[in-house]
Amino acid sequence: MPWKGEKDPYKIWLSEIILQQTRVEQGWEYYERFIKKYPNIQKLAKAKQDDVFKLWEGLGYYSRCKNLHHTAQHISFELNGYFPTTYDTILNLKGVGPYTASAIASFAFNLPYAVVDGNVTRVLARFFGINKAVDTTEGKKHFSQLAQHLLHKTKPALYNQAIMDFGATVCKPQLPLCAICPFQSHCFAFKKNNVTNLPVKEKSIIKKNRWFYFLVITTGKHVFIKKRENKDIWQHLYEFVLLERSHKTNTVSLLTDPDFKTLLHAQPKPLAVSTEYKQLLTHQTIHAYFLKFQINNKKDLQGFEKFSIDKLKTIAFPKLINNYLKDIGWK
């Protein structure tokens, strides 16, 4: 991985932000794209926000991208381009939590802070036979204190990387390599045949379903889009006219809906209705349908921007909308 052994705090910070809620295999490609386009924090700070979001497109959790750009500007313009060098000042950066601050402090500046991710808590829970739930406040505090106690104080970066890699490659969530593990004789979970039950998690994620009906309204060679600004999923990405419902709705009901009549007074019939597009997010599932319309009036839709269809490839859309655009040949 390109960030392994890296000492540049900018590159370490970038990799850690990208890898929040993202698999390494997916994040690797995005990391290399960002480094190529924005090789240093000053380049990222000077970039237009829409360009940064376009590069982030498809990675999800877009608040990370917003905080990334904000923090780059803060460091570049307010801190004269100097990355903070202590744990507390790193922690004060927007979008940086205790884990990320520890990673930057340890890997960039070799400061004695334990990096506690899922790999580390899994190793500790199994080795010591800890039944505290890793997703509770008490559990997080316990694992953090234990990890800090075990940390090699003079070689924290080497130790942190070692235990994280051990959890990722040997003490894996599924099918751990216990048969070749060097800690076999000392591991509580292995000796008690309890490996699959540790670590313990208390909370189960309850997902809600949302139904999005996108009205793809075209006039000539243009289509109406707008940026999502509310504090919700896909903030700062673009979308078509949207009618959201709490349940699945048929086309006939949708076209007679007062919200639809307010948007399109002429009430045209859709030229096409897509099949369902689905996107699974951490706490919700989005079910989307796209209804394509052609209107002839030259009036703009209030709150929407009329954009050339040929240039949609330059706009940052959610993955779900991108899939639709590719399917109809617009991207």
Image (spheres, rainbow, N blue to C red):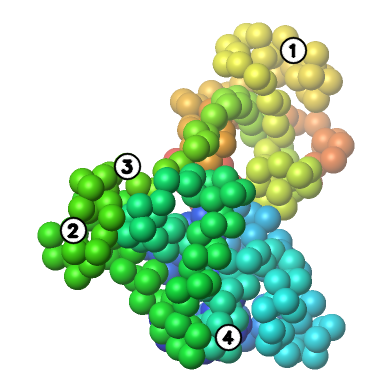
Q: Secondary structure at mark 4?
A: loop
Q: Position of residue 193 (x, y in %)?
A: 21, 46
Count every numbered label the image shows and give the total. Answer: 4
Residue denoted by label 1: 257
**Disc 3 vs disc 2: Cβ atoms closer than 8 Å?**
no
- Looking at marks 1 and 4 on the same chain, the residue that comes earlier in the sequence is marked by 4
Query: Which amino acid type is marked by label 1?
Result: Asp
- Looking at marks 3 and 2 on the same chain, the residue that comes earlier in the sequence is marked by 2
Q: Secondary structure at mark 3?
A: helix
User: Mark 1 or mark 3: which is in front?
Assistant: 3
**Disc 2 vs disc 4: Cβ atoms closer than 8 Å?**
no
Query: Which amino acid type is marked by label 3?
Result: Asn
**Disc 3 vs disc 4: Cβ atoms closer than 8 Å?**
no
Residue denoted by label 3: 197
Left or right: residue 80 compared with residue 309: right
Q: Does residue 177 appear in the picture of this structure?
A: yes
Q: State the separation of the CA atoms marked 3 and 2.
A: 14 Å
Q: Secondary structure at mark 1?
A: loop
Q: State the separation of the CA atoms marked 2 and 4.
A: 32 Å
- Looking at marks 1 and 2 on the same chain, the residue that comes earlier in the sequence is marked by 2
Residue denoted by label 4: 111
**Disc 1 vs disc 4: Cβ atoms closer than 8 Å?**
no
**Disc 1 vs disc 2: Cβ atoms closer than 8 Å?**
no
Query: Which amino acid type is marked by label 2?
Result: Cys
Dot 2 crowding, Cα within 10 Å, few <14, some 14–19, many 20+:
some
* Residue at the extreme left: 179
Left or right: residue 31 compared with residue 197: right
Q: State the separation of the CA atoms marked 1 and 2.
A: 59 Å
